[in-house]
Image: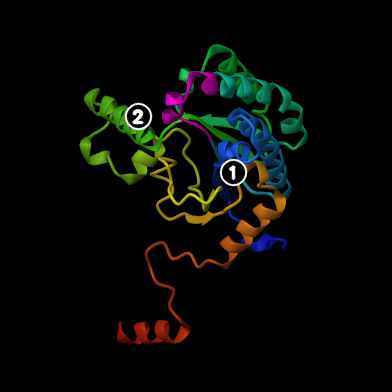
Amino acid sequence: MEPDPKSLPRHVAIIMDGNGRWAEGRGLPRVRGHEAGTASIREITEECAHLGIERLTLYSFSIENWRRPRGEVLFLMRLLKNYLASERETLLKNNVRLTSIGRVEDLPGPALRELRRSIELSAANNGLNLCLALSYGGRAEIADACRSIAEDVRAGKLRLADVDEKLVAARLYQPGPDPDLVIRTAGEMRVSNFLLWQISYSEIVISTVCWPDFRVPQFHETLCEYARRTRKFGGLILKSEDRSSAATAL
């Protein structure tokens, strides 16, 4: 089913889950699932660029992922480095600007250099913002924002009275529109420390499909589900007669 162009989200965030289960279900090492998942990243990125979606944030590697077996972590860092190098032409062809969030300085040197190079080369692109969350944690992001604000208060650059939600949001890793839609693949029903501040009123759609099998048809299904939602942001959508009654009462 094709999504309604008038009902597309500005910002889609995806928790790309199920690579390991996909591989294990086929009798393969877990790392083969991570490898297969890169094809889904390419396809979904290109489709977002085609549809005119403004931002796509991918949960690529969490702070907690550093606790995985050393061999798997090393493989993921090599995969990241190779992916960034091989996909530059695709990013440029599709007018995609690459950005990142997280404590990226924790990445090994080769992967970090490729990340910075891709960000630099795509900086002039004005289409889709593809944001990779790397060495990322939602709690860490909020803590880093609070630390930045506290340092400015201590230095006299800010007053305590200046600290509000707008200021905290401006100190997050990449200020901008909050995700309208969060997708999690592989059927898990949790947010896993992802964009905790930003997803307060995001619509969440769970796909039972593991990430390596999540392609354009599955993506379109989630976009159509999003289009069927009524976003109220904590308020109420009043029927016309209810609005008339409320106006009369005032």
Q: Amino acid at mark 1?
A: Arg
Q: Is residue 213 magenta?
A: no
Mark 2 highlights which residue? 144
Residue nearer the viewer, 193 or 52: 193
Tell me which segment is drawn in magenta: 60-73
Residue nearer the viewer, 144 or 220: 220
**Dividing the picture into quarters, in which one does residue 24 lie?**
top right
* Quarter the C terminus occupies: bottom left
Rendered position, 116 above or below 61: above
Mark 1 highlights which residue? 55
**Left or right placement of residue 180 versus residue 130 in this view:** left
Instruction: Give how far apart the Cα atoms at labels 1 and 2 are.
Output: 23 Å
Q: Position of residue 214 (x, y in %)?
A: 65, 47
Give the mark nearest the N terminus, 1 or 2. Answer: 1
Q: Is residue 65 magenta?
A: yes
* Quarter the N terminus occupies: bottom right
